[in-house]
Image (tube, rainbow, N blue to C red):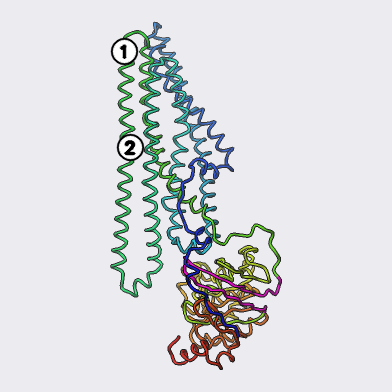
Amino acid sequence: MRAQNPPPRSGFSTVSAAEKSSQFREQTFPFWKTLWRYFQNSRGLIFAAFGLNIVCGLAITAQNAVPKYLTDSILLADLPDTVKVNRAILLMACYMFVCLVGRMLCWHVSMRLFARACARALVGIRTDFFQHVNFLCLRFHEQKASGELLSYLFGSPLAGVQQFLFQFVLIVPFVLFTLLTTLALVFSWNPILAGILFTGLLLNAWVSRGATRQVRDLNQSYQRLESSVSGRASELLRGQKAVKILGAEDSVVERFRQDAENIGTRAYDVQVRSHLQGLKSETILVVFYAMITVAGTLLFVSGRVQLGEIVATLAAYASIQPLIGGLFQCALAQGVAHAGLNRIESVLAHKTSTPESPAAEAEIPQRPDVELRDVVFAYRGSPVIHGVSLLVPFGQKVAFVGHSGCGKSTVVSLMLRLYDPSGGKVLLGGIDLRELSMQTVRRQFGVVPQETFLFHESVKENICLAKPDATDEDIVAALKRANAWEFVRELPDTIHTILGEGGATLSGGQRQRIGIARALAQQPAIFIFDEATSALDTASESLITETLTHALKGNTAFVIAHRLSTIRFCDRVVVFDHGAIVQDGTYTELASNPGPFRDLLDAQNGGLIT
């Protein structure tokens, strides 16, 4: 028997480096560089779309030049009426060709190419995000609610990026080419008019840039609030049973109403600020339209510009006003998208506290021992495990017992490398877990937690999650060994029956037996049962214990239990207290001698512990 006393708590007063690295912080990323990373695989589509947008921009500029030639070269020209009519018809034929082919067709095709590239980019963002979150450590998931993470993918953050990309596709490329070519055309007529037009466009661009920053900051605040509320709402919906048991419907609804009001207030603020910025842009457009009209009149009176050039410049300016408005709205959308992309990239840049080993992976023996060597673990600065050392040879059945919070489940989490120890090592087959990939480690273990989580899928799919290549015969055999086939065969479609979310259509005991079947189907080297029979009635518990006794022969097993009657089949009992091992021996040895285990046994037999 080996007893260990916990070291002084003062040695664990600071947060570990792993915990510091796992604390989530939002960051700021360069928007275009970050976004371009997701378009790398669609460069051909992007360049082709930009080429078509150049044609589209030139076509619009050609349209803007029509009033000049109609006025100066046809209507005011000293030509016979028949020639004027013929030239007008020819001009309109060219105008229609430019509109239908050069502008509409090219714009539509370029839009389709851009839209395809954007769709690929969004798939890439969603996939990268979901994959990264799945491989992040538990420390991260304990800080971020699942509903909040879901809102990143299907809520405001990515929706803002999606909306910006859609506006960018429809507006920005051809508008920029249109503005550049229109400026060049007006400059060829009169540099003064072109200078006024350019100054107005430049001032609008400056206002748009400032508006983008303001909207980005406002939306970062709004999205943080929305994600937080989304996470709470998701949790409340999942916890409806508890809400109803507590009769807390009114208080829950009131809390949600307050959250909804906060979101509404913040959304109102964003909309008002965005509209004010839009009014600034429109004011600039109105002022410079008046300036172009006055300047054109003065130039015409002095004979320095033709009437058609003034008419064409005003027509061009009037035609680009909605384009400028579209650019401004796109600039506002970029502010929203930048805020959303920052939130997504902050998660993608977040590093796990249990990183994969960069070195070549060692081969685990087929019959691996499990060893904890001077393991220390602190969580958020609080000591949890104090210098635990334990060697479990392959094939041994070990029970972990002790009062709640004594460190049993934490030790198991360290074995599964859900966390890395703050000090010491956890070894599997003599290999430090940090030198192995997470999947390699976890495939060695078949785990039945205290509360089995079942997905909204069939019984078969829930079991195949652990062993994708399991046949129907394998699944039925595992269900029989877990004493679950008796009720599964009564389901409408047996193993193909769809279970409710979280296994809501099953009782707690039935869910647990499905979980046991899932672990048995995996056929791992090592089993972990964390209060696996706590949800079962006495008869089922007895059957499961008897089943495990036979099924686990030749395998290592760790059994965490409060019901001490369920661990009699174990070869060894390890007693924890305050994060340290205080007793280690067989069930009979520990039950026969005074000590913590005997105290637990006496208390339970007296009905004080259940």
Q: Earlier in the sequence, mark 2 or mark 1?
A: 2
Q: CA distance from mark 2 to mark 1?
A: 32 Å
Q: Is residue 260 left or right of residue 465?
A: left
The residue carrying pointer 1 sits among few (fewer than 14), some (14 to 19) or many (20 or more) residues within 10 Å by Cα, namely few
Seen at 34% across and 72% down, the residue is: 244
Disc 1 is placed on an element classified as helix
Q: Is residue 369 magenta?
A: yes
Q: Which residues are magenta?
A: 365-394
| Amino acid at circle 2 | Gln
Q: Tell me where residue 461 sits by quadrant.
A: bottom right
Q: Position of residue 599 (x, y in %)?
A: 49, 89
Magenta stretch, overall SS: strand
Seen at 68% across and 73% down, the residue is: 368
| Amino acid at circle 1 | Leu
Q: Nearer the viewer, mark 2 or mark 1?
A: 2
- In the picture, which quadrant includes the C terminus? bottom left
Q: Is residue 318 magenta?
A: no
**Residue 309 in sight:** yes
Look at mark 1 in the image and give the residue it sits on. Answer: 298
**Residue 473 in sight:** no
Disc 2 is placed on an element classified as helix
Q: Tell me where residue 193 sits by quadrant.
A: top left
Look at mark 2 in the image and give the residue it sits on. Answer: 277
